[in-house]
Amino acid sequence: MKIRKRLLEGFNDDRGMGVIEILVASVISLMVLGVAVVMFTRNQSILEEQNEATNIQAKARYSVDRIEEEIRMAGFGLPAFQGLTAIGANSISFRSNLDDVRTTTPPCNSCPGTIAGSTGDTTLTVVDESGFSSGDKIVIHDPNFSQWELNTVTGTSAGTLSLGAGLAHDYVYGINTSLVTVNKYNDITIALSGTNIIRTVDGAATNLVSDVDATNGLVFNFYGISTPSSILRLGFALNLIDPGNPGAAAEFKTDISLRNS
């Protein structure tokens, strides 16, 4: 009965909470709130780091695919083993018909001995000159006799290309040779420059990839071969960084078999 009486008296006490109780409750509430804020901040930081890591991984994959696509164009439209022109630890240079501009001399089946062009000629008769213009670099190639040369276009007229230099070979049709090909080509360089990878086409530079490591952002491996025309495959490593978060980085490595080797 005494215990019940005291409980009833406690419930009927209308004095409310004292200052000490309020202070204790406030301190506990602040501690709980502080822990919640710390946990939220930490989780937010972890989420941001994960997003940054995911973004840089995706950028690295895209960049590797893009560089690989560029290098696979080496030698397109040129004779075999004439694509790569210079190699370095952080750069590679090559020729390629980027715009797929091409023509041939007039085909002549079953007429061996017909001359498509003679040594010293400064004009070349072609099927279609419309894709060429003055200043274009071209490769003239007789695939059956492995004759080829680099030249330039100085002008065009109906069915004719004017050449910057006289032909270096006689181009004569044989039994199995019915035409000579003419391909425009570009000089391309892909190289590390500071924290960027620069693509240069005929002297015009554009930024291919940004936010790479300034020391080893792009590293080529030619597997001991030092002569560009002898290279059949190569490897390269790409190292990307996040300028706002040095802890977020990505490294990708891949091998490439050259398409025109």
Image (tube, rainbow, N blue to C red):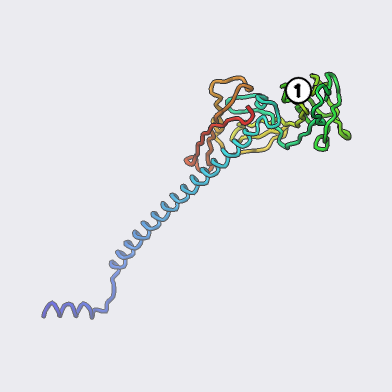
List x then y, in percent, for residue 182: 77, 30
According to the image, label 1 marks what residue?
Answer: 149
> For the point 57% across and 27% down, which residue is it?
233
List x then y, in percent, for residue 152: 80, 27
> For the point 13% across and 77% down, which residue is it?
3
43 vs 261, nearest the viewer = 261
Answer left or right for 24 relative to 40: left
> For the point 24% across and 79% down, which residue is it?
13
Please identify the quadrant where the N terminus is shown.
Answer: bottom left
> For the point 72% across and 24% down, which residue is it?
144
Please identify the quadrant where the C terminus is shown.
Answer: top right
> Outermost residue, front direction?
110
Given the image, on which type of amino acid does mark 1 rest? Glu
How many discs appear?
1
As drawn, 133 above or below 229: below
Quarter-wise, where is residue 34 in the image? bottom left
Quarter-wise, where is residue 167 in the image? top right
Answer left or right for 5 relative to 242: left
Answer left or right for 45 relative to 154: left
Label 1 Cα neighbours within 10 Å, binned few <14 / some 14-19 / many ≥20:
some
As drawn, 51 above or below 215: below
List x then y, in percent, for residue 133: 82, 34
